[in-house]
Image (cartoon, helix red, strand yellow):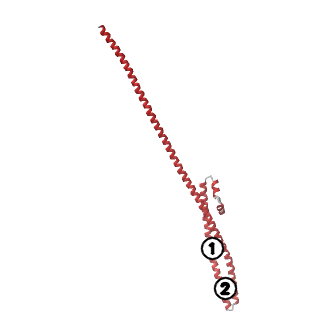
Amino acid sequence: MGLFSRFTDIINANLNSMLDKAEDPEKMIRLIIQEMEETLVEVRTTAAKHIAEKKTVSRQVRALESSIKNWQNKAELALEKDRDDLAKMALSEKQKCSAQLVDIQKELTQLDEFLTSVQDDAQRLQEKLSDAKRRQEAYALRQESAEVRLKVRQKAAIYNIDEAIGKFERYQQKIDRVEAEIEAHDMTQNKDLESQFRALETDDNLEQEFAELKKKVANG
């Protein structure tokens, strides 16, 4: 089932209201455009049919005008020949053609009015369709812009994550260096301490050996 039931529905439609109420405005505008285009094709098809009909009626008008003129000439000729009977019959045929011409001209006038109305309707429908297509383009641009902004933000987020990881790694390296310096300092300090103790032990051994040697010399 279409969005619109007749041509006037489209012309009187408030696109803003319809799109504001739609759950999916982009899908709605596509459906509106599709139905407008289909309706425009129908309007043009109707116009083409009536244009063809107008051409047929116009030919009938010209034929009747020619017949009227022809019967007029025949009536005049009959009077010139003193044939009143033929003149009256010719005038009778002329009146018939004239009556037909009046009816045909009314039909032609109605066709002209209808075609003028169709042309106006087609113009208004085309304007509505153009407006709907502009809105569709606006939606497309908004969608494209939103996708671009999303990509930029995603890239920025990735950059921020990479930057944070880089900073963490640099901090970790700095901590590793500090810890290494502490270990190196402790290692060096421990070696110096051990050396001092060994030196003390060496001094004690030397004093003991010196004392024993001195005692031996004294007893000798």
Task: Look at the image and tell me in which quarter the C terminus lies.
Answer: top left
- Dot 1 surroundings within 10 Å: few (below 14), some, or many (20 or more)? some
Return the residue at label 1.
54
Give residue 176's position: percent from left, percent from top: 44, 33
The one nearer the camera, 4 or 178, is 178
The one nearer the camera, 125 or 68, is 125
Q: Amino acid at mark 1?
A: Lys
Q: Amino acid at mark 2?
A: Gln
Q: Secondary structure at mark 1?
A: helix
The one nearer the camera, 208 or 85, is 208
Can you tell which quarter of the image residue 77 is in? bottom right
Instruction: Point out the tag, 1 or 2, that comes first from the N-terminus.
Output: 1
Return the residue at label 2.
72
Give residue 109's position: percent from left, percent from top: 66, 74
Q: Is residue 9 left or right of residue 178?
A: right
- Dot 2 surroundings within 10 Å: few (below 14), some, or many (20 or more)? some
Q: Secondary structure at mark 2?
A: helix
